[in-house]
Image (tube, rainbow, N blue to C red):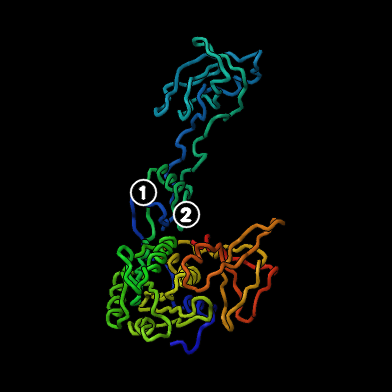
Amino acid sequence: MFRRLMSFDEAKNAINQHIKPQPLGTEEVPLLEAHSRVLSQDVTSDLDIPPFSRSTVDGYAVKAEDTYGAEENTPAKLKVCGTVNVGEPPQIRVAKGEAAEIVTGAPIPDGADASVMVENTQRNGAELLVYRAVTKSENVMKKGSDIKKGETALKAGTVLGTSEIGVLAALGATKAKVYKVPVVAVLSTGGEVTEPGGKLPPGKIYDINAYSLSAAVLEAGGKPVYMGVVPDDKEQLRKALEHALASADAVITSGGVSVGPHDLTPKTVDSLGEPGLIVCGVAVKPGKPTTVGLVGRKPVFSMPGHPTSALLLFHLLVRPVIQGFAGRPVREIAVVKAVAGARMFSAKGRRTFVMVKLKRADSGGLVAEPVETGASGAITTLAKADGFVEVPADEQFIDAGEEVAVSLLKSAS
């Protein structure tokens, strides 16, 4: 199945050509369940926010011109005509030479156009002394100054965070129309893999990939469904994949994609339906055995069994697809400039991704130090790494001291 490896660019192009990651539909969810969901349509305000002009301080609502010239030694003298309470419409009107007692958030009464802070006043019964002049609209949040009626408050494609939820609540919404969350089935293969939770049998390893890949799916905006560990048996693998495809929008497997006698995944995926395999091996290190298939409209991403390889290729190839299915903006991985702290070699004929940790040099610039792995299976490699440096397939190495572009893994979600 690996007679000709695709270049990394060829693999990406094949995925983009065959898989169109459009949102998978819409639904309406309660506002309290809408956090991290993606709006499926623009939200237009049916009212002004705030719906009335209101005081931003405790003090007195006044006509600004009545305070002009007020100073510590020559205060303006006004008559208190009443009180405005928060949460109810004003029952008074402020005439020339008058002031209304007001609290923060209360509506500005008719006739008033500013508020004086209580700290700048002195009250003696109905007489109010104002020791500091205010300008028109001072200490007043005007009607519609935050959001105007008819204005687009939030745009489709916005990921709802705490602030956006607050905006919807301010508009009186109790629900939000959002894109559906793509369901991604995640399963592991291999006779050596066992599920965490029990005592580790001799010769076995715990299922690392299903959990780390499920977390990566969550970060990309999907809903992972763990399908368990499937042994190296053709029929059991086929049934597991058919079940996964029937219950999910996409499938991610790990293991069983190399060239060993028990590596059954590529042929099994290819037999499940058209168009079948679209990528079967990529000229990269780590991650050469990565396989991508398409059954109908549902993609099957088969990642290597090595944890670092699986997670790296997920970020590079799978993450954008899941983000697209979720209606999320597909952002390129952030890149920073640094200086290579040591020589970085490429694998002959393969684009090589060297995991690096960034540190600050005495000069203030960044230095990219390769993370020693020993093997691509080290799960701690990505935990230690801040990002990776690409060494092109046609270059033997990047020398120490050369400027490099570091793709930041921490910003990949």
Kind of residue sitting beneath label 2: Lys
Q: Which mark is residue 31?
A: 1
Q: Residues within 10 Å of mark 1 (few under 14, many from 20)?
A: some
**Which sits in the foreground, 128 or 31?**
31
**Which sits in the foreground, 69 or 348?**
348
Disc 2 target residue: 155
> Is disc 2 placed on a helix, strand or loop?
loop
Answer above or below: position of 241 versus 71.
below
Query: Spatial distance from mark 1 to mark 2, Cα to Cα?
Result: 16 Å
Q: Residue at x 50, y 88 (%)?
A: 4
Please identify the quarter of the rendering in which residue 387 is found: bottom right
**Which sits in the foreground, 17 or 331?**
331
Please identify the quarter of the rendering in which residue 321 is found: bottom left
Kind of residue sitting beneath label 1: Leu
Expressed as whole percent of the image width and height from the top left, the position of residue 162 reads: 44, 47
Expressed as whole percent of the image width and height from the top left, the position of residue 2 reads: 46, 87
Direction front: furthest residue: 202
Please identify the quarter of the rendering in which residue 355 is found: bottom right
Q: Please tell me which of labels 1 and 2 falls first in the chain.
A: 1
Quadrant of the image for the N terminus?
bottom left
Expressed as whole percent of the image width and height from the top left, the position of residue 220 reads: 44, 62
The answer to whether any part of residue 97 appears in the image is: yes
Q: Which mark is residue 9?
A: none
Tell me whether the residue at label 1 lies in contact with that at label 2, contact meaning CB atoms closer than 8 angstroms: no
Which marked residue is nearer to the observer: mark 1 or mark 2?
A: 1
